[in-house]
């Protein structure tokens, strides 16, 4: 589609007053949409029209709109973040759609992500998982020289791959079990591939995995949908590493109890 043309779309948007209320799809017409708009900019225009008519705007999460913060998160035609691979909702452009398309827009659906309003969900469970083990022990004082601790490039690259996770929750939304394994594994691997993360490594895996389970996320059964929709392409290998560290932590804990250490 050329950049000079606009399109008209029919939207089916999930509207829900709060987590205790029943929700439903409501139909809206998005008219004269530029293909250069982002998906969120298109929703902004729809909301301006609703406000002009004295109606409640559609609530949706957003912040940086640069694919960095992890705030945006919508199921678009059944796909977390929409049809483009490795792309956040805010970076999805309307040129991926065509004139006359019908678009279904839903929030992340998971027991651990209760709806706040419309397309907004509470992702505080992610924060609580990180709080149980997302830290390292460091000596106080001046910052050490960045080159003082040698780290193999392969390990540094893996740590950076894991650190790329923005915590958006697409992995949970796409998983048929609503598992947070990819998110939790990325946060664990971020430290597991660095020397600074070794002192708490086993304890970190144990605490974060058990907190993930306590928050009501489902189990990972290797569907791989999480990786398919992840806007940062987090590798599945981190889930295997997390499972290995968790089992090791439990075995070491059992050994301590047996031998009284």
Image (tube, grey):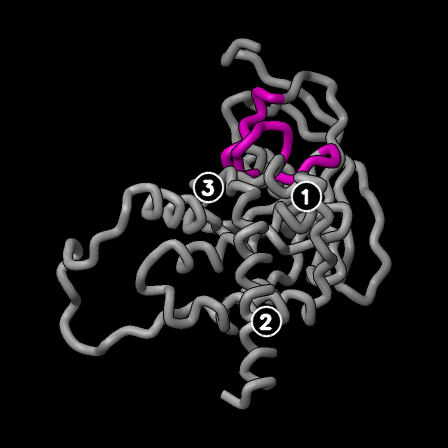
Q: Which residue is mark 2?
A: 251
Please tell me which residue is depicted at 54% across the width and 90% down the height of the picture: 260
**Tag of residue 67:** 3
Quick check: marks 2 and 1 in contact, CB under 8 Å? no
- Which residue has dot 1 on it? 50
Boundaries of the magenta span: 77-96
Q: CA distance from mark 3 to mark 2?
A: 40 Å
Secondary structure character of the magenta stretch overall: loop
Mark 1, other Cα within 10 Å: few <14 / some 14–19 / many ≥20: some
The answer to which image quadrant residue 114 occupies is bottom right
Q: Nearer the viewer, residue 85 or 17?
A: 85
The relative height of residue 245 versus residue 231 in the rendered view (above or below) is below
Label 3 crowd bin: few (<14), some (14–19), many (20+), radius 10 Å: many
Quadrant in the rendering for residue 34: top right
Q: Is residue 180 visible?
A: yes
Element carrying mark 2: helix
Q: Name the spot of residue 79 as percent of width and height, x first.
A: 69, 35
SS state under label 1: helix
Query: What residue is rendered at 58% in x and 28% in y?
Result: 84
Task: Please give left or right for residue 54 compared with residue 152 in the image.
Answer: right
Mark 3 or 2 closer to N-term?
3
Please tell me which of labels 1 and 3 falls first in the chain. Answer: 1
């Amino acid at each position: 589609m050329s950049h000079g043309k606009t399109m008209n779309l029919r939207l089916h948007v999930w509207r829900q007053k709060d987590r205790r209320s029943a929700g439903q799809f409501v139909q809206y017409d998005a008219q004269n949409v530029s293909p250069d708009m982002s998906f969120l900019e298109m929703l902004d225009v729809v909301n301006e029209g609703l406000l002009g008519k004295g109606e409640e705007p559609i609530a949706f999460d957003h912040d940086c709109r640069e694919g960095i913060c992890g705030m945006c998160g919508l199921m678009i035609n059944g796909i977390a973040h929409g049809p483009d691979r490795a792309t956040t909702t805010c970076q999805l452009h309307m040129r991926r759609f065509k004139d006359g398309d019908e678009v279904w827009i839903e929030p992340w659906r998971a027991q651990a992500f209760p709806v706040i309003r419309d397309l907004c969900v509470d992702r505080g469970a992610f924060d609580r998982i990180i709080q149980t083990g997302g830290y390292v022990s460091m000596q106080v004082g001046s910052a050490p020289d960045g080159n003082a601790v040698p780290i193999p490039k392969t390990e540094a690259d893996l740590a950076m791959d894991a650190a790329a996770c923005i915590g958006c929750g697409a992995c949970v939304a796409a998983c048929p079990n609503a598992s947070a394994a990819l998110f939790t594994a990325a946060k664990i691997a971020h430290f597991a591939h660095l020397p600074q993360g070794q002192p708490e490594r086993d304890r970190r895996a144990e605490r974060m995995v058990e907190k993930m389970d306590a928050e009501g996320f489902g189990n990972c059964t290797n569907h791989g949908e999480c990786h398919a929709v992840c806007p940062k392409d987090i590798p599945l290998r981190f889930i295997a590493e997390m499972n290995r560290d968790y089992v090791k932590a439990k075995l070491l804990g059992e050994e301590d109890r047996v031998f009284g250490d």
